[in-house]
Amino acid sequence: MLEFVNRAGSDCYKWDSEEARGKLPLWVADMDFKAAPAILGAVQRRLDHGVFGYNIVPQQYFDAVSNWFSRRHGWHGIRREQLIPTIGVVPALSAVLRALSWRERPWAKDGKMRVLTLTPAYNCFFSSINNIGAELVESKLIEVNGRYEIDWEDFEKKIEQSDVFLFCNPHNPTGRVWTYDELIHIMGICEFYGTFVISDEIHCEIVMPGHKYIPYASLMESDDDYYCVLTSASKAFNIAGLQCACIFVPDLPMYEQIDRAINVHEVCDLNPFGIVAAIAAYNESEDWLDELKQQVWSNYLYLKHTLEEQLPVLHLTTLEGTYLAWVNIEATGMRAEQFCRQLSEQESVLLNPSEMYGTTGHVRINLATSADIVQQATERLVHFVKRICK
């Protein structure tokens, strides 16, 4: 069912941007697999209708979201009046931050809102915070035996200074899937200090064997809790270009404020294809998703085995979730930006350097592609590192 597509020449950013042409691009976080058959069928039926004007978001979409998270993740009772549809998780994030910036904060220094995130962090977190004039506060994750952990003492100290905690669950780029105990600890600290939590859960479906995604909202006891959740079928089902996401907001006054910000930002009108694609993803494409996860896991195991056998100087972080491998390259003595630039120039492989995620000494590798491409890119990576480490 899972079908690799050669995307070169299709005007996709990952393969056809100027720096990507003629190279193996394991960078931009989308996939090289054709969407699930049910999604293709739903989009084709919508195409055959022949009219593509403005859409309402039907009840079927809200039912699909609610039923999916209840069935797949044990997050029960999501209601229509708690969901705000929008065109993507990043626009949603910017709108939520804008809504929060409107709130009265008499304690805020210099009138600035302070937003805490765990670094390394998804690069758009930084731009969203900067674009609304907020101040970034960072709590750096600790790398312990190939796995990232929260520095709880530092986290609590930084939460005390912050208005908002911008969270990524599962975590991009380190691949952590946060445990129940970690989530409860985060929730307790944020509630104690009155910090609003924005939980970006776009990667929630891509979880590796032995790990379990726990929705942040599923731990909450009240509709007036101080948080929201950003989610979408786009990452798991490779439909990001169809622009359909939603924000779960349990508190009514906050819902109204975020809904207003969504309209102020003009990100409230969804693509008609995105709506039907998301419904088909959630209602009819579970088997496709399970096959995708098996392919990502197989690609990860190949990369892990090859690095252990041939490049022990590189250290691969344990992949718990997402399809993004995170590799420590500090032993090469190169900055990640320099490493990626030379790998591109000399071996025609594109990776993401860790500087864009707020840290040094690592690269991010997209494993959501064919086994053949992962193997080719890994062979070139091995050749490159062996040459520079002579």
Image (tube, rainbow, N blue to C red):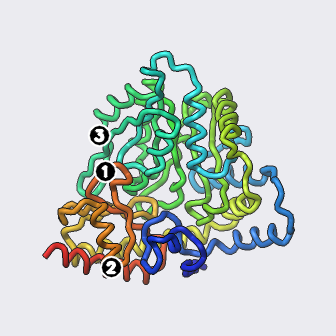
Q: Is residue 93 visible?
A: yes
Task: Tell me: 16 left or right of 283.
Answer: left
Residue at 56% over, 20% down = 104
Q: Position of residue 180 (x, y in %)?
A: 43, 44
Q: Is residue 357 above or below residue 111?
A: below
Image quadrant assignment for residue 343: bottom left
Per the image, the residue denoted by label 1 is 359
Q: Position of residue 348 (x, y in %)?
A: 37, 78
Residue at 47% over, 79% down = 370
Q: Quadrant of the C terminus?
A: bottom left
- Amino acid under disc 1: Thr
Q: Is residue 189 above or below residue 269?
A: above
SS assignment at label 3: loop
- Count of residue discs: 3
The tag earlier along the polypeptide, 2 or 1, is 2
Label 2 CA crowd tier, 10 Å (few <14, some 14–19, many 20+): some
SS assignment at label 1: loop
Residue nearer the viewer, 178 or 13: 13
Q: Is residue 355 above or below residue 196?
A: below
Residue nearer the viewer, 83 or 268: 268
Per the image, the residue denoted by label 2 is 347
